[in-house]
Amino acid sequence: MKLKKFSFAALLASSMVLAACSSTSNTLTFNPQAPTAATVFNTNNQKAIVSVVTKDDRGQPEISNYVRDGQIQKLYASPDVSQLFQQVMQQNLNAKGFRLATNGANTNVLISVKNFFAKVDQGNLRYEINSKIQLTVHVQGAKGNFTKNLGATRTQKGAFNANNDEIKNVLDANLKEVITAIYQDQEITNAINQYSN
């Protein structure tokens, strides 16, 4: 009798562990690419001391939601979108030769995340994922201000139902496009140099 109770308890515990392992996470992890060798370090940029602040101005914290098994699944980013773009902009400015500081900066770069979302439309046999990322970058210096909007969209269609991996792939491709645009941009660099001194 003790062996049956022990076997039943062991079976129940292993079933719970397997059920927990098979559940899908509601967090999508993003690893932004670093600046490439094509990003030129310019010693002239060392004159500007830059503070970078990123704010999430989206209306909701999730980056996507969809219906799975009759339940609404909300997906979230790790790191959160403000940390993600904070990291990207700091890497960008550092690679281009700017000095970064939290205090005593002569120029502020403010990033406002306006949109980072993948809209999922599903039918019985097809799905469509529409991803949109939009940022506004403000450069504020002693001599003036500059604003630039950056963004991209991406769409993917497929058979049956969308899942976390497909949503992440669309957002990843969209994110990579926006990050590449940030790294290749020279207008923000020029504005920092123009308005900092």
Image (spheres, rainbow, N blue to C red):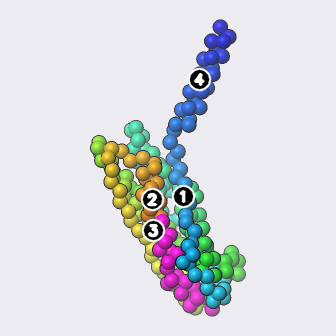
Residue designated by label 1:
30
Question: Residue shown at 68%/11% (left/top)?
Answer: 2
Q: Tell me the tag on residue 180.
A: none
Identity, as a three-letter code, of the amino acid under mark 3 = Glu
| Residue hosting label 4 | 12
Mark toward the viewer: 3 or 4: 3
Q: Which residue is denoted by mark 2 in the rendering? A: 171
Task: Please check the rendered image and state whether residue 193 is part of the magenta-colored stretch, yes or no.
Answer: yes
**Region of the chain picked out in magenta, as a range:** 176-197
Asked if one can make out residue 114 in the rendered structure from this viewpoint, the answer is no
* Mark closest to the chain's N terminus, 1 or 2: 1
Q: Tell me if mark 2 has few (under 14), some (14-19) or many (20+) residues whose alpha carbon lies within 10 angstroms of its own.
A: many
Crowd band around label 3 with a 10 angstrom C-alpha radius: few (<14), some (14–19), many (20+): some
Q: Position of residue 186 (x, y in %)?
A: 51, 83
Q: Could you tell me the amino acid type at mark 1?
A: Phe
Q: Earlier in the sequence, mark 2 or mark 3?
A: 2
Whether residue 40 appears in this view of the structure is yes
Q: CA distance from mark 2 to mark 3?
A: 10 Å
Q: Secondary structure at mark 4?
A: helix
Classified by dominant secondary structure, the portion drawn in magenta counts as helix
Q: What residue do we see at 53% from left, 50% from top?
A: 27
Image position of 46 with respect to 118: above or below: below
Report the residue at 66% width, 16% height from top.
Answer: 6
Give yes or no for contact between labels 1 and 2 (Cβ–Cβ under 8 Å): yes
Which residue corresponds to mark 3?
A: 177
Seen in the picture, residue 4 relative to 32 is either above or below; the reply is above
Residue 16 coordinates in the image, percent (x, y): 57, 29
Q: Is 106 left, or right, of 129 in this rendering? A: right
The Cα–Cα distance between marks 3 and 1, rounded to whole angstroms, is 14 Å
The reply to whether the magenta stretch includes residue 20 is no
Say which quarter of the image contains residue 170.
bottom left
